[in-house]
Image (cartoon, grey):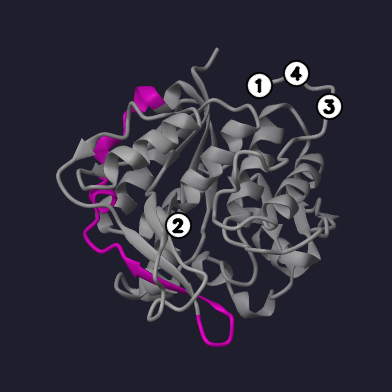
């Protein structure tokens, strides 16, 4: 039996948020978030045994950040403290009531992640490994680490999942969309489950004429050949999931209220992967994930509070 259900490679940042513009904010709320860490946290709350592969800078936030991850049950044996600082981002509200993001992440400890930080034995002891385009974007060495992790995980028999999670600002200093596509091409040969969102991620995948596939259905038809299972997230339009030639549309679950959409896609990934690991089919896993994602947007922050009602429906599959 594997030691862990889901391991992810990436970066968690310090989140400093305000409900007013930063220019007038008198206080900031401290949280911690990052795409794959958000997924690991929700997966752990759904019963998965999780682990994080990263590097944590020895700055004033480090111990509190690691303690928060440990409290969620995330294994940190491969998330060492190193010299350096952790990335920080600020969330505020602009004059029109829209949320603004300001990042300070260049040169972060996690951006020094390299292939030598990836332990093949650790990945081999996991049922699934989640990789992200954001991790690839933060540095050349992190991109190399991601490609290495994809190969060794697949060779070890792990389920390999990949979310392109395209961030134009990150890739702008690394070569733009062409560099993002090249990075995706490095990992796709090893990927079992591809988890893109439309239309934002189409530019980051090595396919022809992505501008013609702005809807989930069209995007799935275009992307289905890139991995055995492709789940295209299309916001309120739902999800298009399945292998090539077997697209199924799974309608979204309308949320009761929307407070903050940060992290909804990460929570979706968590529920989808956990449901797959429990033995569910892709369409059923998407239905469960839609339900979990709709509940996360009712809470502020990329990671919902501990008392949020995040559960998977009962199934005949054995628990994790």
* 211 relative to 124, above or below: below
Q: CA distance from mark 4 to mark 3?
A: 8 Å
Q: Which residues are magenta?
A: 94-122
Answer with mark 3 or mark 2, whichever residue precedes in sequence: 2
Q: Which residue is mark 3?
A: 315
Answer with mark 4 or mark 2, whichever residue precedes in sequence: 2
- Say which quadrant the N terminus sits in: top right
Q: Which residue is mark 1?
A: 320
Q: Is residue 52 visible?
A: no
**Furthest residue toward bottom:** 95
Q: Is residue 109 visible?
A: yes
Q: Which residue is mark 4?
A: 318
Q: CA distance from mark 2 to mark 1?
A: 27 Å
Q: Residue at x 58, y 73 (%)?
A: 208
Percent of width and height locating residue 51 = 44, 31
Q: CA distance from mark 3 to mark 1?
A: 12 Å
Q: Residue at x 74, y 54 (%)?
A: 294
Q: Which residue is mark 2?
A: 133
Percent of width and height locating residue 314 = 83, 28
Answer with mark 2 or mark 1, whichever residue precedes in sequence: 2
Percent of width and height locating residue 54 = 33, 41
Towards the viewer: 311 or 156: 311
| Crowd tier of the residue under label 3, counting other residues whose Cα lies within 10 Å: few below 14, some 14–19, many 20 or above | few
Helix, strand or loop at label 1? It is loop
Q: Residue at x 30, y 57 (%)?
A: 87
* Left or right, residue 68 beside residue 263: left
Tag in front: 2 or 1? 1
- What is the number of the mark on residue 102? none
* Left or right, residue 69 beside residue 207: left
């Amino acid at each position: 039996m594997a030691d862990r259900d889901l391991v992810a490679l990436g970066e968690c940042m310090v989140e400093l948020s305000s409900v007013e513009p930063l220019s007038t904010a008198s206080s900031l709320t401290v949280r911690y978030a990052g795409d794959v860490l958000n997924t690991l946290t929700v997966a752990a709350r759904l019963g998965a045994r999780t682990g994080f592969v990263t590097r944590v800078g020895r700055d004033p936030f480090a111990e509190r950040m690691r303690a928060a991850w440990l409290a969620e049950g995330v294994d940190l044996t491969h998330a060492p403290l190193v010299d350096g600082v952790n990335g920080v981002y600020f969330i505020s509200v602009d004059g029109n009531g829209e949320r603004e993001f300001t990042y300070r992440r260049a040169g972060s400890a996690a951006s020094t992640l390299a292939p030598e930080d990836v332990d093949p034995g650790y990945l081999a002891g996991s049922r699934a490994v989640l990789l992200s385009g954001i991790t690839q974007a933060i540095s050349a060495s992190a991109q190399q680490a991601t490609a290495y992790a994809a190969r060794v995980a697949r060779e070890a028999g792990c389920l390999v999942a990949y979310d392109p999670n395209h961030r134009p600002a990150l890739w702008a200093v690394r070569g733009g969309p062409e560099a993002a596509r090249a990075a995706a091409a490095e990992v796709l040969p090893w990927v079992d489950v591809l988890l893109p969102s439309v239309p934002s991620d189409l530019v980051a995948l090595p396919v022809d004429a992505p501008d013609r596939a702005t809807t989930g259905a069209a995007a799935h038809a275009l992307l289905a050949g890139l991995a055995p299972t492709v789940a295209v997230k299309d916001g309120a339009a739902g999800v298009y999931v399945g292998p090539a030639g077997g697209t199924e549309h799974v309608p979204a679950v309308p949320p009761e209220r929307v407070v903050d959409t940060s992290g909804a896609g990460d929570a979706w990934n968590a529920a989808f992967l956990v449901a797959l690991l429990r033995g569910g089919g892709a369409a059923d896993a998407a239905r469960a994930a839609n339900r979990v994602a709709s509940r996360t947007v009712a809470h502020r922050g990329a990671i919902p509070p501990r008392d949020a009602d995040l559960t998977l429906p009962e199934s005949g599959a054995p628990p994790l």
